[in-house]
């Protein structure tokens, strides 16, 4: 609320350069950086900026000219931009959890483009008709490195951004260079926009489907220039104050997808989207629906599953250690790391590494198997907590920063808020039956719904 009051007081949504809204391009990363400097952890490990990373990027760029080159694909009705992080499934393939269940149905004429994740791609990928995005991404990077298409930010915009920087320092004790950030995102726009337009002209899609829209504003801008409707598939938790989706009343985001397909009706209840309500459409979550059936025969045991995230890992791991040592709680404690924590958790949470807590720091066993065999879950702000409820887990929300993400679950009686081990021990022994309407959160027949909606959008 303080962050939104700041942007309102500074009238940042009115800020434009060359008729392009400035604030919506830097809003998400600005707020994330302010939160980071105020003690929030790191969600994902970055790739670095050293010589090795640059050489790897050049190699991928050169390889993409011949291998999975999107400009060598033919026309398709649907163009998917998938999620870069894949998951290894039991069939030995790496799946894009949000797109591959749709692709496997094979009812849409599509091509799927994947950006690199940490300068690599997982193989073998389950995705048919897969192309990579290095030619666009790294051609833009190369142009920026040699100084091509550098933006010129008007003086009046620079002045307002500097004033906003001072206000951020006063209100949040954070040092954020908004001018540099604006120059960067506009430089990215200048280099990528012509490339995306060229790709769209070549593939001639009727609809573009994107899994994560924030950060892809230039892609969406190219689609709008060419009159191509854009659709986002929900990929995670959406909540009030999620800066990728939630916008203040009477404000909007110009480069937001035309449609948002959500997991269920619940997700539109607490968020002010910058598109009309009838374009926020509940369809379901195909991967979850499939996995519920796959683990139906797994026996549940006295196991307590902690769902970690990089932003709250220090606090949650300390809580898990306290729970494991408390004699009143006889559950086996399992701490499931977020994939973004896999490579650094021993340094970040050294006490956890030296404990008796079982730490899951790799794709196996799968998260859904852990859900199926557990009886209790503890989390803070993860989408996974909603998914765990579909496995009938007794659910507790640890009351630290970011717990407001799961506040609706507490309000609806599907989860219990706990501040310490005492609360958790009492909650487990209370016998209170939590209630969770799965279909309200995750609509049934997801693939049928998604295919139908995409076809309808194409026909409009």
Image (spheres, grey):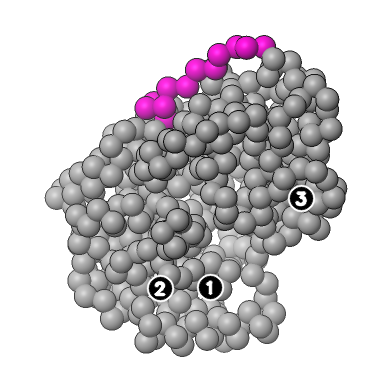
Judged from the image, the secondary structure of the residue bearing numbered disc 3 is: helix
State which tag comes first along the sequence, 1 or 2.
Answer: 1
Q: Label 3 crowding class (10 Å Cα cut-off): few <14, some 14-19, many 20+?
A: some
Quadrant in which residue 161 is drawn: bottom right
Residue at x 73% of width, y 22% of height: 424
SS class, disc 2 = strand
Who comes first in sequence, dot 3 or dot 1? 3
Circle 2 is placed at which residue position? 132
On residue 290, the disc is: none
Residue 10: x %, y % from top left: 62, 43
Give the residue at x 79% y 34%.
Answer: 324
Mark 3 or mark 2, which is nearer the start of the sequence?
Answer: 3
User: Does residue 435 show up magenta in the picture?
Assistant: yes
Residue 228 falls inside the magenta stretch: no
Q: Nearer the viewer, residue 86 or 133?
A: 86
Q: Does residue 46 lie above or below 266 as drawn?
A: below
Q: Which residues are magenta?
A: 430-441
Query: Can residue 3 be spotted in the picture?
Result: no
Point 46% across, 56% down: residue: 89
Q: Position of residue 402 (x, y in %)?
A: 66, 36
Element at label 1: loop
Residue 31 placement, left or right of 367: right
Residue 37 is tagged as 3
Expressed as whole percent of the image width and height from the top left, the position of residue 233 reads: 38, 48
Q: Residue at x 73, y 59 (%)?
A: 344
Q: Residue at label 1? A: 120
* x then y, percent, for residue 105: 24, 53
Question: Disc 3 and disc 1: Cα gap in Å?
Answer: 29 Å
Q: Nearer the viewer, mark 1 or mark 2?
A: 1
Q: Nearer the viewer, residue 153 or 197?
A: 197
């Amino acid at each position: 609320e303080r962050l939104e009051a700041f942007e309102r007081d500074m009238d940042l949504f009115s800020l434009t350069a060359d008729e392009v809204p400035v604030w919506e391009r830097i809003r998400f990363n600005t707020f994330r950086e302010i939160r980071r400097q105020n003690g929030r952890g790191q969600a994902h490990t970055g790739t670095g900026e050293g010589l090795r990373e640059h050489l790897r990027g050049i190699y991928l760029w050169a390889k993409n000219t011949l291998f999975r080159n999107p400009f060598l694909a033919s026309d398709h009705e649907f163009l998917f931009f998938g999620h870069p992080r894949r998951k290894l499934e039991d069939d030995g393939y790496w799946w894009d959890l949000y797109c591959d269940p749709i692709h496997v149905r094979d009812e849409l004429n599509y091509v799927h483009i994947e950006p690199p994740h940490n300068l690599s791609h997982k193989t073998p990928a389950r995705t048919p008709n897969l192309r990579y995005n290095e030619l666009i991404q790294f051609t833009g990077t190369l142009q920026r490195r040699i100084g091509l298409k550098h933006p010129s930010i008007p003086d009046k915009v620079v002045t307002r951004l500097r004033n906003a920087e001072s206000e951020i320092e006063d209100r949040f004790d954070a040092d954020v260079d908004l001018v540099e950030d604006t120059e960067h995102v506009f430089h990215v726009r200048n280099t990528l926009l012509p490339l995306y337009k060229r790709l769209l002209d070549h593939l001639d899609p009727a609809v573009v489907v994107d899994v994560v829209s924030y950060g892809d504003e230039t892609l969406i801008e190219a689609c709008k220039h060419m009159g191509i409707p854009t659709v986002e598939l929900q990929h995670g938790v959406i909540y009030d104050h999620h800066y990728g989706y939630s916008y203040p009343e009477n404000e909007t985001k110009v480069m937001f997808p035309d449609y948002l397909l959500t997991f269920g009706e619940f997700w539109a209840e607490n968020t002010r989207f910058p598109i009309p309500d009838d374009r926020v459409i509940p369809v379901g979550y195909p991967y979850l629906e499939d996995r519920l059936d796959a683990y139906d025969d797994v026996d549940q045991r006295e196991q307590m599953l902690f769902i970690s995230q990089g932003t709250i890992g220090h606090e949650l791991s300390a809580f898990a250690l306290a729970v494991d040592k408390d004699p009143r709680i006889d559950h086996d404690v399992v701490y499931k790391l977020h994939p973004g924590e896999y490579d650094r958790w021993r340094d970040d949470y050294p006490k956890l590494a030296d404990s008796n807590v079982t730490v899951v720091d790799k794709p196996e066993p799968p998260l859904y198997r852990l859900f199926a065999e557990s009886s209790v879950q503890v989390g803070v702000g993860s989408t996974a907590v909603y998914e765990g409820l579909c496995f009938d887990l007794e659910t507790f929300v640890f009351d630290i920063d970011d717990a407001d993400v799961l506040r609706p679950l507490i309000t609806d009686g599907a989860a219990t808020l706990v501040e310490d081990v005492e609360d958790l021990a009492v909650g487990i022994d209370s016998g209170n039956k939590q209630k969770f309407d799965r279909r309200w959160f995750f609509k049934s027949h997801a693939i049928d719904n998604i295919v139908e909606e995409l076809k309808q959008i194409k026909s409009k």
